[in-house]
Image (cartoon, rainbow, N blue to C red):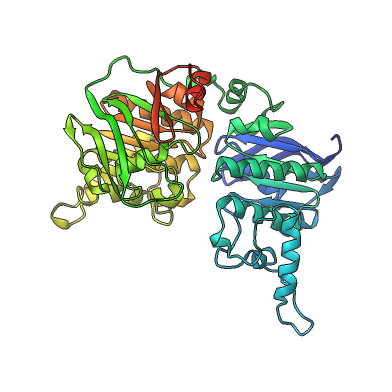
Amino acid sequence: MNQVVLSAKGITKHFGGVQALRGVDFDLKVGEIHALLGENGAGKSTLMNLMSGVHTPDQGEIFIDGKPARFHSPRDAQAAGIATIFQELDLVSSLSVAANLFLGRELVHPHGMLDGKAMLREARKRLEAIDRSIDPSQLVGELSIGQRQVVAIVKALSYASRALIMDEPTAALTVGEVDRLFDIMRGLASSGVGIVYISHRLEEVPQIAHRVTVMRDGKVAGVTEPNAPQAQLVQLLVGRPLNELYPPRSDRVGDVLLRMRQASFRPHRASPGWQAPSKIDLDVHRGEIVGLAGVMGAGRTELLSALYGTGVPGRWQGEVTIGGKPARLRSIAAARRAGLAFVTDDRRGAGLMLRMSVGLNLVMSIIRRISPNGLLSARRQDDAIKSSFGNFDIRPKNPEIAVGALSGGNQQKVVLAKEVLGNPSLLLLDEPTRGVDVGAKGEIYARLRKFASDGLGILVASSEMPELIGLCDRIVVLRNGCSVAEFSGGVSEHDVLAAANGREG
């Protein structure tokens, strides 16, 4: 694995008055999986776009097999054997898998008609080399996210004879789908394809990468081995130690806000794959951040959604009180009246209206409050928007742009800000930093701690163990829908995982 297939030397790039890249050197070897890490704005997407032909560099050169290459379009890069899979998959949901694989390059009969049978045969052959479970005649919209990712890879491989660039390929995948994707990536690498793997998930790096390059402020901050300590990667990413990401825990908490004793949720109808909360014991005090830990399928998301009324219809049994009063949480409206707010783990699918402006997204949850007598108050709307921008440092500071145009970290700030605008007493968070870079995570942690210090209670479910241990005052472990253990913040990861897997004691 010594031959370099793709490299960039001394690359600079400006966009108006902004310098996105400052003399970047990068190389990818034959059969290598090279992880490229960096915060939003670090320059990794710009570098990716230069290597895939979306942009051209202001200075510096790109090389293929040691020879200078000049890409004026993605077609030029594809012709050189380089393909890119962007985070927003370039697939058409209403078309079949086969139609997507041949989109723009359809097979036709001599008389000009589409040869559907030939495309199905060829599509099946290509899919079988990677994943036999996908039917080429099935609509893409009917596939899971993981299966769509496989289709995107198969499509890209018709170009990627030399190098494949993957932007956040695991951001929306389940644990099982991530494992399957990694198996596919290892197979591609063993066949000689070099892979650039862009991700925010530091815990995945040692599982898949051969080498790691970290970017910060448009420059290469360092190149490390994949098994480098996470603290070292964080230091390179944000320029400060890992322990500085998490604000100090509070030593003062208020009264019990949420109290659950042997609380079980009884769905009105069975829902396959939905883990109903059962025999839950936990408290959340005012001013406290409580974490929910557990392996995939333990019931973390289901507990939050059942409290907020977004899960399957049903009713609670056992003791569930909010502020000392029995809570009847059977709908979103009832939950909001009780002072609950909820941040979903799917901000793009359920948390935001991507085509609407940042400002409108922020105020939609409080539209009645800022509309006295049924008329929208422009002054109240502006005050609410300014408050959110100030509290969460949303960038760019322009409420008129579409929220879908923001980075993942800033989209997540908008989701959090709009829920806090409703002045809840209890904030439910499901995977609050999923798909968010390390720097933005630190900002979100600081703001959550600030709101907790102001008296807000926070119940957070996360699959990132360092996040739970570093952020939370207490951690409640779930297994098979039940609460099985509780730990103080700062507990060892080993103890939490042992309880989550049934090995405590």
Q: Is residue 263 left or right of residue 189?
A: left
Count of marks overlaid on the render: 0
Figure quadrant of residue 227: top right
Q: Is residue 74 left or right of residue 200?
A: right
Q: Quadrant of the N terminus?
A: top right
State the residue lying farthest toward the bottom: 111
**How far across and down, in percent of the image, does residue 411 sit?**
44, 44
Q: Is residue 352 visible?
A: yes
Figure quadrant of residue 203: top right
Relative to 248, is 114 above or below?
A: below
Residue at 40% across / 36% down in the picture? 481
Residue at 76% across / 46% down in the picture? 188
**How far across and down, in percent of the image, does residue 103 sit?**
67, 67
**How far across and down, in percent of the image, does residue 222 sit?**
68, 26
Q: Is residue 60 visible?
A: no
Relative to 372, is 122 above or below?
A: below
Viewer-proximal residue among 186 and 230: 186
Viewer-proximal residue among 360 and 399: 360
Figure quadrant of residue 92: bottom right
Viewer-proximal residue among 374 and 308: 308
Viewer-proximal residue among 75 and 290: 290
State the residue lying farthest toward the top: 251
Residue at 55% across / 27% down in the picture? 238
Q: Is residue 355 left or right of residue 451?
A: right
